[in-house]
Amino acid sequence: MNGRIFLASGFVALAAIAVVLVMAASPSTPEPASLAEAKAAAAKAAPPVARPPEPEPAPTPEAVASNEPFVIKRILPISGPIKYGEWHWDETGVPKGPIVITVDLKARVLSVFRDGYEIGATAVLLGTGDKPTPLGVFPITQKDIDHVSNIYTGAPMPYMQRLTDDGITLHGSKVEKGYASHGCVGMPNPFAAKLFAITHLGDKVYITRGKQVGLGDSLVGS
């Protein structure tokens, strides 16, 4: 019995010595000098992880203009020429649809169409002389309900809707005979407020001279 204990004890002692010798013979891995070095080493060893691309934001409804042609379906029943300061607005029963604005420099009248139905018409102020109102098709690029001109210092331009980068806009104004603008299209403030409320960035303004639209005419909102 004592001999078996002695042999077992001797075996344990030899095993312990063998473990010590193995540990002494094995190369030891030095610990990183700091946590930062450990993180750096781990970052180098780990393969890079590709991130999925960020989804592009969808365009806002304001920034999308219609490019579908449509036919003039209704003209407001206005008798005689529209006088200075006079305006008309009737959108009763008119469906939703693209907005198109026309300005006839000869008649000095601005008309508003929604889905081919004329819902508004007003006499306007226009530019003269060396500051004429330009001809062409212009998208609305900016809207500012309480705009003050930075070209003509301090001049209020309520319900401003910008057409060109050099200052041509639609805006509310005092529309009276004998007055003119510096190229802008000025309209009575109540009408300008209604127009401002229904337009979007990208809606088009067609400025012509002497071309009046009628029933069956085709306009393009692009």
Image (spheres, helix red, strand yellow):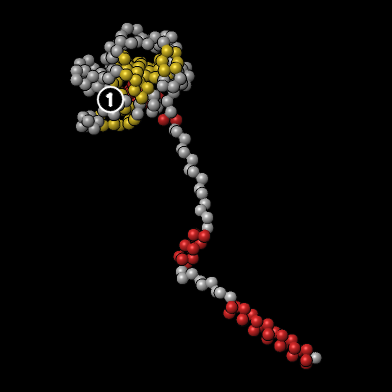
Q: Secondary structure at mark 1?
A: loop
Look at the image and tell me whether residue 99 can be seen.
no
Name the foreground residue: 121 vs 139: 139
**Residue 214 lies in quadrant:** top left
Which residue is most to the front?
Answer: 25
Residue plotted at (49% across, 65% down): 38
Residue found 52% across the figure and 58% down from its top: 46
> Percent x, y for residue 172?
29, 24
Which residue is identified by label 1? 168
- Residue 55 shows in this picture: yes
* Position of residue 100 measured from the top left corner of the image (x, y, whole percent): 39, 19
Q: Is residue 213 left or right of residue 94?
A: left
Going by the image, does 220 lie left or right of 145? right
Q: Amino acid at mark 1?
A: Ile
| Residue 32 versus residue 151 in the image, above or below | below
Q: Give 174 or 11, whichever is nearer the viewer.
A: 11
- Residue 181 position by quadrant: top left
